[in-house]
Amino acid sequence: MCEVFHQFTMGLRVFIKDYFLGFWDYETPKVMVVKNKTLGVIYRSVQFLVIAYFIWYVFISEKAYQESETRPESSVYTLMKGTAVHGDDILDTVEYVQPSEGGDVISTTLRREVTYDQKQGTCAEHFRVANANCTKDSDCVQGEVDFDGHGRRTGRCVQYYNYTFKTCEIQSWCPIEEYAAVREPALVEAINFSVFIRNSIHFPRFKVLRGNIKDASTKRDMHKYLNKCHYHEEKEPYCPNFRLGYIAVQAREIFSELCETGGVIGVFINWQCNLDLDPSHCKPTYSFRRLDLRKNQTNSGYYFRFAKYYVKDGVESRTLIKAYGIRLDVIVHGHAGKFSPIPTIISTVTAMTSVGICTIFCDWIMLTFIDKNEVYSGRKFDEITQEPQVQVNHEPPGPVVSTELSYINSFGSNHSDLSEGVPL
């Protein structure tokens, strides 16, 4: 047991000694010319791909020579314009736009379901509410509140309005919406409504402030221009007025279907600014996409409820309105870049270093697939542990003259030339 432990200790000492001495070895690459056309074609092809990648993608496409800013400061103001005729009524923006003050979210009502003349009282619960159907009073628990229902149960079982079956009576705003709501026709004129979107963006790192509205010499000219123009990607890129019909088409939606179920559409404003050019070239681009899930009927569409309260015959009453419409979420993305020496140096050094991958790749191919009888590997790897002995004036051999390179491990620095695996 002691002998095994002694051998282990000696072996560990030798390993540590060799590792420590080998740590101070110096390695240098050996220059070897391999005249093999297959390997040469592979080497130059890989070099070309690496250089093309850095020139085209890194420097031209990604502009890696620029300092960039991706979190700009932005503000959005929206305003809906348009007038619609609804029966004998004339509807303006106060009637169908929420919220009226504008912001990065704005919605317009396209269809309404109205429950008129609701009052606080008792009435029958809707039959689709859980445990609402009954045959006698004992089926209804007094004071029970179902959060999927419409109010608090009184403990009575009553006839469901004009039907023959019965449901539990509740205390609530009566009559309930599901029974008394009146469905109004869709506001088809809304397809011509226009949305005014004003956006300003600031890149604080570069001290650049831009807006999406075309500059004008006077306020009068600006007002005149904004009243007449409608956005067009090529003809009017600086006009901030967007027709609802145009937005629906760009989002690949059918406007008549949106009138029935409503929907949420994202208006994406993208600023891609190359500040090596004049800031006037920094222009926004717009894209539109449906945001709510159309496949999931429960989560699709967009609607909201609000009420108009009034006093009738001394009793507080209300008109409940369930409004279906389009909600526009304005989302701003910005990216600005400008030349800077630091990212340029880093990208250039990275490109030059990556070219060295070609040599490593071709060495692996040469030593793994092309090596003929280990001729390449024999020439590529040398180990020098001691300088050759030096003889002076052909005298009898004397003591060995050692130099500072004695016992140094390295890869030889001599120049070799191989042609098809045969040393020349």
Image (tube, rainbow, N blue to C red):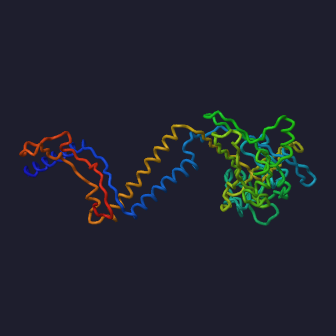
Residue 154 in view: no
Q: Exactly how many numbered labels are in the figure?
A: 0
Tell me which corner region of the image, top left, top right, bottom left or bottom right, holds residue 104.
Answer: top right
* Closer to us: 291 or 276: 276
Q: For the view shown, which residue lies furthest in the left direction?
A: 396
The percent coordinates of residue 304 (x first, y second) are: 75, 50
Q: Is residue 133 above or below residue 194?
A: below
The percent coordinates of residue 181 (x first, y second) are: 81, 57
Tell me which corner region of the image, top left, top right, bottom left or bottom right, holds residue 136.
Answer: bottom right
Residue 344 in view: yes
Q: Is residue 167 left or right of residue 375?
A: right
* Closer to us: 319 or 304: 304
Tell me the residue at 28%/46% (across/down).
Answer: 27
Tell me the residue at 12%/47% (across/down).
Answer: 10
* Closer to us: 341 or 139: 341
Q: Is residue 71 left or right of residue 404?
A: right
Tell me the residue at 68%/52% (across/down).
Answer: 142
Q: For the view shown, which residue lies furthest in the right direction?
A: 88
Q: Is residue 18 above or below residue 380?
A: above
The percent coordinates of residue 65 (x first, y second) are: 55, 42
* Closer to us: 346 or 185: 346
Q: Quadrant of the C terminus?
A: bottom left
Q: Is residue 41 left or right of residue 112?
A: left
Q: Is residue 337 left or right of residue 197?
A: left
The percent coordinates of residue 160 (x first, y second) are: 78, 61
